[in-house]
Amino acid sequence: MRKLKPTKKFKSKSTLKISACCMVKNEENNLPRSLDSIKNQVDEIIVVDTGSTDKTIEIAERYGAKIIETPWQDDFSTPRNMAIDAANGDWIIFLDADEYFATPKKVRLAIESFSKDAILIPRINIDETNDSSEISRDWCLRIFKNADHLRYRGLIHENIADIKHERLDYTFGNEDLTIYHTGYGTQIIESKLRRNLALIELESKKYGHETKHDIALADCYAGLKDFEKSLYHARKALDSEVEAVASRGNLYHKILNAMRELHYTDEEMLKVADEAINTLPALPEFYAERGMILCGLDRLDEAYLSLHKSLEVWRKLNGDIHEESYFAGAADKVYMRLAEIEAYVGNFKEALYDISEAIKLSPNNKAYQKLAAEYRKKI
């Protein structure tokens, strides 16, 4: 392991000291944007490199980072904890290289307003291969106090844990701490998923199976298109007595997607959509899921109301909803389906309005544009 001293020190008017940490390997394309978003809000930058062969280390040095080099050991927590051990700040911001703050200038002030040990912050997952369109929103723990009792645990899907007490003293941050994440676009690398799967299974066998493993396995198997196993683990996680913090929306999403791929009946899927609505009434996607399913059952009046309800709930969605939401990436499809229903009953003026709203959300969709042209002819 080799350590390099930082090339410069960071200055701040605040008495609160913040350390920015990052664990990397071959991140020359992502790291500059991530560090740019935080460099003026922190007092030091610490980068742990696990074997880069590109210009990652050179880039980190340009930002004055303290660099720790250590070999990769099939364990995500160990290098992260190395960064914590080297940090001098009162607080730690630990971003992945493919994450960056939406409003960097608000970060320090926002952190100063919190007293809990750890902060879950809103994350917007975007697809850079598709005009940086939003895929989903979730919550992730990226900010925490620099304290002896806070360390990462887990070989994979690691997270901060309180190693001295039973429960972590955490809270949810506000929109000033929102980050963007570019790591998972429409092209998910199979080898990465299989690596994650192996580490999840190893950790489960070594330390005992937990609900967090079912959540991670549901995601992995969905990416690998093994929908039977994805469905099994998502359902198991939801039915567990252990609370799946900020993950229930994602689990219902995995269940419905798996059921669709496995050709479950609309009646069976409708029961799950209704369950999701009852459990998470403030999320818009499950009203939309219900509406789509009702279309398949030819219950168009109910479908129309449920689809409109999803848009109504979406407009009211705010930072107080601490669950993953994927509706923004699917809102155009809701408008499109509403347009099809309106056109089916001959209301082409309303159909044109709905498809126009879909085009605003997905301006490069040629199918939507073609449909809009057809509706114009019928008005």
Image: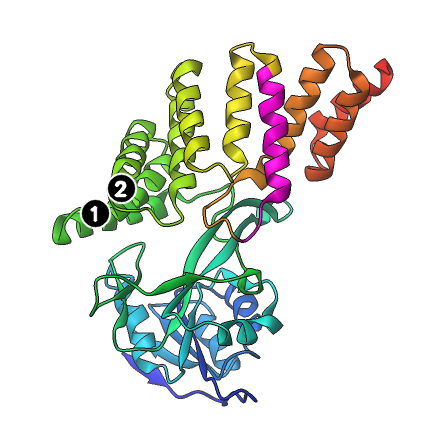
| Residue 195 at x, y percent in the picture | 29, 48
**From mark 1 to mark 2, how far is it between C-alphas?**
7 Å
- Quick check: 184 above or below 297? below
Mark number, residue 214: 2
Image-quadrant location for residue 87: bottom left
Main SS of the magenta part reads helix
| Residue 289 at x, y percent in the picture | 51, 27
Segment colored magenta: 302-319
Indicate how the structure is coloured in the image: rainbow
Number of marks drawn: 2
Q: Viewer-proximal residue, 93 or 174?
A: 174
- On the question of residue 69 being in view, the answer is no
Is 175 displayed left or right of 143 in the figure? right
Helix, strand or loop at label 1? It is: loop
Is 359 displayed left or right of 228 in the figure? right
| Residue 199 at x, y percent in the picture | 24, 51
